[in-house]
């Protein structure tokens, strides 16, 4: 039986933070628009900000569907599966917002991710999600799979880019500035990379 939680804490928070992979789902308001589902990995790129707020780093890619959908309507679902240990699936349904480099909140948010060198991955934005419904379910049909390590390909590919070349890369892609459904996506050109923030020391 699934259970609804009032907050992300305790065993639930531990489970979420231990998973090396999660998924994000968004969609435009248009009934015939493109539903998007994306896998998210890279150790250190996800953080629980408080009992009802989580965030993850949005890195360089060939599209910006999640960003576009959040800019239009804010709806998002995050999902984690247990591929090892007891079966479990956790979903956070809520409202999301992409916080871009030139946002006054960006530096403070980035400090919440001290265990990853975000500059190596073409950081575009930080997606902040405010939970409205938090539920788990059994996950009995999810297979056992073993995590070995993160791939290093993404970091190797984008570590050689600076702000100008990264913007040029994005401008060549047809679905970065606008989504597959012609919604506004990532604002271009990219603002300059912020200076490396001090590590966050809050509770």
Image: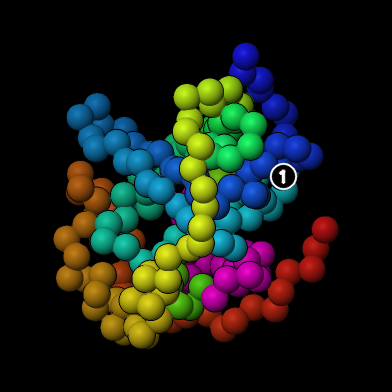
Which residue is pictured at 48% across the width and 78% down the height?
119
**Quick one: 151 or 66, which is closer to the camera?**
151
Q: Is residue 164 above or below residue 64?
A: below
Residue 73 in the figure: left or right of residue 15: left
Which residue is pictured at 52% across the width and 67% down the height?
103
Residue 180 in the figure: left or right of residue 14: left
Q: Position of residue 71 (x, y in %)?
A: 39, 49
Q: Which element carries disc 1, helix, strand or loop? A: helix
Q: Position of residue 36 (x, y in %)?
A: 32, 41
Tell me the colour scheme of the image. rainbow
Residue 146 in the figure: left or right of residue 153: right
Q: Is residue 46 above or below residue 10?
A: below
Instruction: Count the labels in the image.
Output: 1
Which residue is pictured at 45% across the width and 52% down the height?
40
Q: Position of residue 186 (x, y in %)?
A: 33, 61
Which residue is pictured at 79% across the width and 68% down the height?
201
Residue 176 image-quadrant placement: bottom left
Numbered range of the magenta stretch: 94-117
Of all residues, the one furthest to the top in this rendering is 1
Residue 93 in the figure: left or right of residue 31: right
**Quick one: 73 or 161, which is closer to the camera?**
161
Q: Is residue 42 above or below residue 19?
A: below
Q: Which residue is mark 1?
A: 14
Residue 94 visible (yes or no): no
Q: Position of residue 178 (x, y in %)?
A: 23, 55
Check residue 71 for magenta coloring. Answer: no
Q: Is residue 83 above or below residue 133?
A: below
The quadrant of the image that shows the N terminus is top right
How would you rate the neighbour count of disc 1 (Cα within 10 Å): few for under 14, some for 14-19, many for 20 or more?
Answer: few
Residue 64 visible (yes or no): yes
The quadrant of the image that shows the C terminus is bottom right
Check residue 101 for magenta coloring. Answer: yes
């Amino acid at each position: 039986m699934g259970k609804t939680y009032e907050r992300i804490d305790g065993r639930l928070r531990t489970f979420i933070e231990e998973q090396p992979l999660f998924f994000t789902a968004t969609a435009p308001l248009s009934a015939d628009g493109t539903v998007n589902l994306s896998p998210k990995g890279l150790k250190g790129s996800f953080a629980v900000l408080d009992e009802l707020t989580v965030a993850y780093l949005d890195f360089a890619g060939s599209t910006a569907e999640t960003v576009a959908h959040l800019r239009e309507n804010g709806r998002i679902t995050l999902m984690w599966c247990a591929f090892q240990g007891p079966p479990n699936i956790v979903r956070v349904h809520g409202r999301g917002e992409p916080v871009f480099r030139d946002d006054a909140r960006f530096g403070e948010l980035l400090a919440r991710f001290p265990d990853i060198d975000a500059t190596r991955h073409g950081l575009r934005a930080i997606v902040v999600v405010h939970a409205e419904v938090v539920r788990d379910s059994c996950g009995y049909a999810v297979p056992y799979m073993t995590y070995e390590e993160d791939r290093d390909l993404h970091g190797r590919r984008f570590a050689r880019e600076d702000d100008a070349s990264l913007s040029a890369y994005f401008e060549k892609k047809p679905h970065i500035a606008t989504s597959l459904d012609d919604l506004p996506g990532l604002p271009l050109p990219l603002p300059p990379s912020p200076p490396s923030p001090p590590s966050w020391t809050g509770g």
